[in-house]
Amino acid sequence: MARKTKYGTYGDDFKATAVALGELPRVKASDVAHVLDIHPVMLYRWKKELNDGIIMAKKDKITLDAEEKSELKRLRKLEKEHDELLIKHDILKKSIQFCSDRKKKSSNS
């Protein structure tokens, strides 16, 4: 397999926006990296570069429009519902296992 020799380059505005998205409350940086199709380490590197002043973009220039904000709100709601469903699923699995173990023990007596 040939090694990739040409990589995409990103401007300071894109990097600063990506970092700002990763810093929003209840937004995972790994999810932002996945959506932007970049490696999560790159996002953390950009964050460090922004803090060190290597990336010259001001954070207060970065704003999200109403559509982006509503989409992020919807995403947070879906993630919360997903987490709740995972917990419920885990409880049901444990309950089924517990009941099946009790049946096995009571049938041997």
Image (cartoon, rainbow, N blue to C red):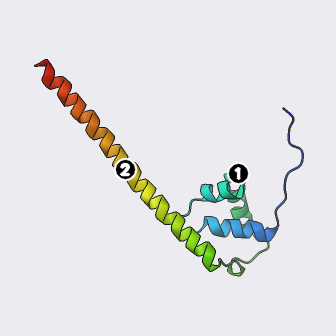
Check disc 2 and report its element: helix, strand or loop: helix
Amino acid, disc 1: His
Which image quarter: residue 106? top left
Q: CA distance from mark 2 to mark 1?
A: 29 Å
Q: Can you tell which of label 2 and label 1 is closer to the viewer?
A: 2
Instruction: Pinpoint residue 85: horizontal percent, then vertical percent.
Output: 39, 52
Q: Is 76 drawn above or below residue 91 in the view shown?
A: below
* Nearer-the-camera pick, 82 or 26: 82
Q: Earlier in the sequence, mark 2 or mark 1?
A: 1
Relative to residue 67, is residue 50 drawn left or right? right
Asked if 21 appears above or below 87 in the picture, the reply is: below
68 and 62: which is toward the camera: 68
At 23% from the left edge and 29% from the top edge, which residue is drawn?
101
Give the image quarter of residue 28.
bottom right
Q: Is residue 84 left or right of residue 94?
A: right
Residue 1 x, y percent position in the rendering: 84, 32
Marking on residue 39: 1
The vertical placement of 55 against 66, above or below, is: above
- Closer-to-camera residue (56/91): 91
Work out which quarter of the rendered image holds the C terminus and state it. Answer: top left
Name the amino acid type tagged 2: Ile
In the image, farthest residue toward the right: 5
Number of the label disc, if any, that sits on residue 7: none
Count of marks placed on residues: 2
At 14% from the left and 22% from the top, the residue drawn is 107
- Does residue 26 appear anywhere in the picture? no
- Write the residue at 36% across / 46% down: 89
Q: Which mark is residue 87?
A: 2
x and y percentages locating residue 91 in the rendered image: 31, 45
